[in-house]
Image (cartoon, rainbow, N blue to C red):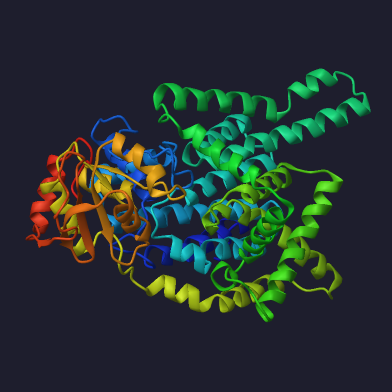
Amino acid sequence: MTLHLHPRYTAFCVLILLSLPLFFINIQDHHGWGDDFALYLNGAMNLAHGIPLQHNTWIFNPGNTVYSPPSYPPGYSVLLWPVVSRVGISFRHLCYFNSFLYLLLMFVSYGWYRTYAGRTAAICMSVMTVYSGYMVSFKSEVLADVPCLLFIMLYLTIRESRRHIRYRYVLLIITAFAAIEIRSQAILLLPAEGLIWLVTVVSTIRQKKQGQFRYILRQPAVLVISITLLLHFIVSHVLVPATAGTTQFYFQIFRQALHQSSPSFLWEKLKDTIGIVTAMPWPGRYAAPASGIAAFIRTVLFWAILIPFIIRIVRRPALTDTFFMLMLFMLLFYPCRDPRYFLPLFPVAAVYLYATVRTLYIMLPRLHPATIAIPLTIVYFMADYNTLLHAATAPISGGIMEQREIDAFGYISSHVADADVILFTKPRALAMFTGRRTVNLSWYLSPAAGKPFLDSIGVKYVLTLQGFDDAAFINYMRAVAPPADSTIIGSGYTLYHLRQPDVHIQGVAPFNMVQHPHPSFDTISNTYIQLSSTCGPPYR
């Protein structure tokens, strides 16, 4: 007796087998330096301990217009909540959680690509989406970009599907709302829907259809936009009110970008944006400035993506096309150029690239689709092999939490008062691990211009970490806030105690180095338990 599986179930079985390595590669015990992750984990720990989600001891500096908004949307913290409440801040367990998200992303991306391609091509494209060198290296980051991409792709899949889906509107509202509450950039789904609705309105009026008013109001955009915005308003203003200044932070970023929008500025931004978009199929290998063969490949990829996009926009744009266009426009003016901000463009760009390959395939002699898809997938991974291998095997060095952080953060928790404010380049991570009040510098202001705000909140210490770009902090102390003494509190960590205005500073040595004994791991664990009101469970 021969067992025959439906091709759909065969595809699912293949995807499950291909997803298993995700749970074994790039599983880390530490986290790369940065502190975006700290706001998400802080929110998850607050939820685990029944504290308001946005509660934090990090102080927002309104003079720093590019570092970070006062708060992030709560969605990703809600996703992390079950993991953090169970195991605490365990980066190894969080890597396994990310592996699960990648597994879901593989299946959702398969459904998305299956809308446009055959099963073999869809499997290959979903594998390339998840296993690119950039994505594998990114898997150890506790950041909201991948779950946001997951829900954006789910939304686009449901929206563009040609099959009848029960409760389609309900699913669209849920996925759009989830994506927006995880990462703010997903809100571009709604104006993208609005543009499609406007195209439909113009087309309907021109054709003079009977009952055109009713037809216009029954379009998905009307219901999805209105209910999603209502739900977002309830969450951001009632259930989890955003910290004051969040909206103004984003307006200020784009206002500054528009103010600088000279033709030369826009041209440079356009080249940079196009460079990142065209590097996305091979983000590990071709993300750097290209020359020679890499420049040629980037140019080919650019036109292979752009030509189908232009053709679709001119003929009759779909939601996919308007979303791609709005994302490009936003990133043109957004100052941060980290490739992770471009992740929502990846699946759409892949569809455009597939359209170009399919056009060339039709021009070739008759071949089975697998004859094209599988070799291209092999070439794809060969081109990115070194990046993929390094991402899968190399441990994170110099990250959080190593022994030096245990020493330094334990000292701060034991010796710095709750009311004192510490100036540090990664204040959100420092606030989460120590429960102390922290703030960042105003990078683009002179030390004298930034000092009044720092004085108003009572900055008493400056923390520097060797190897970080701490020149601005040293210059700040030399220019307007000389330290009374300093203490080495961990390998590479120096804590400067600033002179207070009522202290006579003549004759005081500015750099009196004092070495203090470091607390043990047990000591810092007990410190975290005592700080449960702000930090939640101890680091594990």
Outermost right residue:
207
Residue sitting at x 69%, y 51%: 115
Q: Position of residue 77 (x, y in %)?
A: 37, 40
Residue sitting at x 58%, y 54%: 342
**Which of these two is toward me, 458 or 141?**
458
**Which of these two is toward me, 449 or 232?**
449
Residue sitting at x 76%, y 58%: 306
Q: Position of residue 242 (x, y in %)?
A: 42, 30
Residue sitting at x 8%, y 52%: 523
Residue 195 image-quadrant placement: top right
Q: Is residue 521 left or right of residue 125?
A: left
Q: Position of residue 290 (x, y in %)?
A: 64, 74
Q: Is residue 64 left or right of residue 42?
A: right
**Which of these two is toward me, 371 or 250?**
250
Residue 384 image-quadrant placement: bottom right
Outermost front residue:
506
Q: Which image quarter holds the N terminus?
A: bottom right
Q: Is residue 429 left or right of residue 194?
A: left
Q: Which image quarter holds the C terminus?
A: bottom left
- Number of numbered tags placed on the structure image: 0
Residue 500 in sight here:
yes
**Compared to 403, does 455 lie above or below?**
above
Residue 540 in sight here:
no
Q: Is residue 150 left or right of residue 333?
A: left
**Compared to 226, does 108 lie above or below?**
below
Q: Position of residue 302 (x, y in %)?
A: 72, 64
